[in-house]
Amino acid sequence: MKNAIISGLFIGVLSGTWMFVMHALGYSPQSSTLAPIEYVSVFIPLIVLYFGVRSYRAHECGGHMGFLEALMQCFKILIVGGIITVAASIIFIDEFAKESNLMDFSSRIFGALLLGILFSLGISVLLTTKPNKVD
């Protein structure tokens, strides 16, 4: 669980920082538009999730990990990261993006949820070392 908390903290802090950097660069969240530079934020959970699960496989599983074990670790990491990111989004909306509301972020948060599920499946398949055992 320690690995999931640390990796989730990285995802949450980096995603929250990215929101504030985007605001500093002059991009504000609006319901109908999405700036191309905002797509860079997709790489934050992908990269941290990959390295978090790979670290879990190497240090806690002895180099061998089944698919469901990897998937559960991905979900643990994403839950911790999601809680921190949503908290940062609420703070961001309250303090900096007063013209926006939580509804503007809800579609992006839902999209992040779908991407997180897809990333979890892909990374679990990629890092599974016990192909004949589901768990």
Image (cartoon, rainbow, N blue to C red):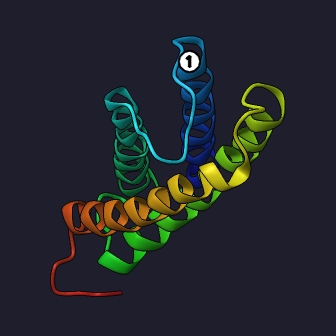
Q: Is residue 30 visible?
A: yes
Mark 1: secondary structure: helix
Is 66 located above or below residue 11 in the figure? below
Give the residue displayed 40% in from the left and 68% down from the top.
Answer: 117
Q: 119 and 99: which one is in front?
A: 99
Describe residue 78's horizontal placement relative to residue 116 as left or right: right
Give the residue displayed 42% in from the left and 36% down from the top.
Answer: 41
Give the residue displayed 43% in from the left and 45% down from the top.
Answer: 45
Among the 4 quarters of the image, the one containing residue 121: bottom left
Q: Quadrant of the C terminus?
A: bottom left
Is 43 located above or below residue 113 in the figure? above
* Residue at the left extreme, as displayed: 131
Q: Is residue 2 visible?
A: no
Among the 4 quarters of the image, the one containing residue 78: bottom right
* Residue at the right extreme, as displayed: 94
Describe residue 121's horizontal placement relative to residue 12 as left or right: left
Q: 51 and 21: which one is in front?
A: 21
Q: How many marks?
A: 1
| Residue annotated with mark 1 | 21
Describe residue 103's horizontal placement relative to residue 8 as left or right: right
Is 30 located above or below residue 19 in the figure? below
Q: Position of residue 83 (x, y in %)?
A: 70, 54
Among the 4 quarters of the image, the one containing residue 93: top right
Give the residue displayed 21% in from the left and 76% down from the top.
Answer: 130
Q: Position of residue 17 (x, y in %)?
A: 60, 25
- Look at label 1 and name its amino acid: Val
Q: Position of residue 59 (x, y in %)?
A: 43, 50
Q: Quadrant of the N terminus?
A: bottom right
